[in-house]
Structure formats: structure tokens, C-alpha cells
Image (spheres, rainbow, N blue to C red):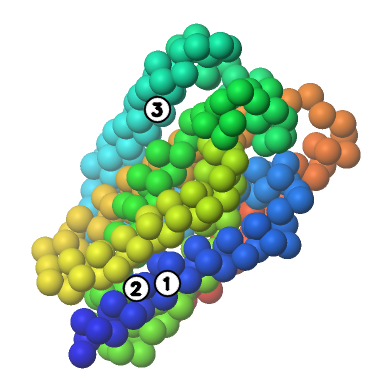
Amino acid sequence: MTLIAILIGTLAAGIGSVWLAALLSFGVLARYTQHMLSLAAGALLATAFMHLLPEAFESQAGAKELFATLLVGLVFFFLLDKAELWHHGHEHHGGEHHGPEAAAHAQHDHTGHVHAAHSHHGHDHGHGEVKSGSWAVLAGDSVHAFGDGILIASAFMADLRLGVVAALAVLVHEVPHHMGDLVVLRQTSNNRRAAFVKVSLAGAVTALGGVVGYALVDQLYDYLPFFLIMASSSFIYVALADLIPQLQKRVTARETVAQIAWLAIGIGLVTLISGMAHHH
């Protein structure tokens, strides 16, 4: 009975949050691509600094080990990004692509608007200009979702009502963060459905975390802080290495104010929702 409740709770939280995020970012906010980049950067940074890291450091794990994990995570996601750009440089070495440098250069030069990037590499059509960050986001998402699954499972095993509250808390606080993920993935290919499916699959890992958590909750609980740190390192990396450089262009004062406002909205949303979730 508990296992069924865990499965329902984790799937609702993991996939429901992606669907809600997709409704918002592809529907209501679809026209504001540039603003969504700022929102995404704010949401990812706030998820890491206001939610995941504090939770990890509240555990019994030592600060030195946790910071070492954060460092390893950042370097790992940097290498993952390098591999992605390198692989892509070889895949499309014809035409305008000349290895990873061209891909990296293209990433920072033509990201003013998603559509501008795609028209620039028209012949590649959708696969053309891979911007980095997609694998880092998906890997971080999967680790984060797995950790969420363990948390939801342990809450359900303590008390059914607590489990429902935990699942709802995860669902709500993941929405702004998944909006950020969808923005990052929409940039790597202009395919909405592919972005949605990838983030949904990463969200579905919550259920896997729930099942594993149900079976091994006592053994895994000690490692939970390290899951949280690895997930946060991917979000910090993507925000600082991929999203914020795109906002560092010379724009008008009005656009700069809008960027800062949307960044603050992203941070505010996650902080507010994390705070509410934390009180349960």
C-alpha cells in the first residue's frame, strides 16, 4: 500500500511539475524568450543556493566533503559540456562548423534570440547550433529527481499525510525550475516536443528514486546530501556558464532593467516556494 502511494506521489510530483511548467512556458510566456532566459537563470541559481545547498548542509555530512562534491560536480558538468560541444563539432564539421571552438563561439554570439540562431544556421535545421547546457541540465535534473523521490518515499514511510504534503511541495517548487530547464533545452534544438519529452523523462526518475528509497531508505539517507549537492552543481554551472553569458550583451537600459527584474522574479519564485515547502 505504501509503495503504491509512493509511486503515485512521485509520478505526480516528477511529471506533473514538468507539465505545469510546459503549459506556462510554451503557452502564456512563449513570446518572451529573452525574459525567460533571465527567469531560468534566476530559478536555477535559487534552486541551488536557497533550496538544495541549505538542505544538504543541514545534514550530518561534513562541510569539507560537501564542498569537495560541489567542486567535483562543477568540473564534471564542465567536462560534460566540453564533450557535447566537441562531439557536435565533429558531427557537423562541414559548412560553418569548425570543431568545438566554432560551436562555442556560435553559442555566445548568436543567442540573442533563439530564432536568430536557427536562421543563421539554416542548412542544419534544428540540429544546427547546439548550445551547451542540455546534458548538464538533464543529468542534474535526473539526480535531483532521484533525490526528490527518496525524500518523498521517506516522508510516506513516516506518515501518509506527510508523504502527500512532501509530494505536493516537490511538485510546486519544481515548476519554476522546470520552466528554466525547458528554456535551456529549447535553445539546444528548436523542437518543443523533444524538450518536453526529455524533461519529462528526467522528472520520471522521481518514481525510480521513490522505489529505491522505499527499498533502501536507511542506507541511502546518508547519501542524500551528496545527491542534493551534485544536482545543485549542475544548476549553478548551467546558470553561470550558459545562461548568464547570453545576458551579458550590450542592451538598452530598459532591456537591462527587464533582465534584472526577470532574474529577480526567478529567484523570488523559487525562494518563496522553497520556503513554504521547507516548513512542512
Q: Which residue is mark 2?
A: 10
Residue 121 image point, x, y percent: 63, 23
Residue 108 image point, x, y percent: 62, 23
Instruction: Say which residue appears at 32% left-offset and 52% top-offset.
Output: 143
Q: Which residue is mark 1?
A: 13
Residue type at the position of mark 3: Glu
Residue 233 seen: yes
Instruction: Name the N-terminal-most of marks 3 and 2.
Output: 2
Instruction: Name the N-terminal-most of marks 1 and 3.
Output: 1
| Residue furthest to the front | 123
Residue 272 image point, x, y percent: 59, 66
259 vs 186, left or right, is right
Up the image or down, 29 lies above or below 5; here it is above
Determine contact: label 1, label 2, CB under 8 Å. yes
Residue type at the position of mark 1: Ala
Q: Which residue is mark 3?
A: 84
Q: Residues within 10 Å of mark 2 (few under 14, many from 20)?
A: many
Q: Quadrant of residue 258?
A: top right
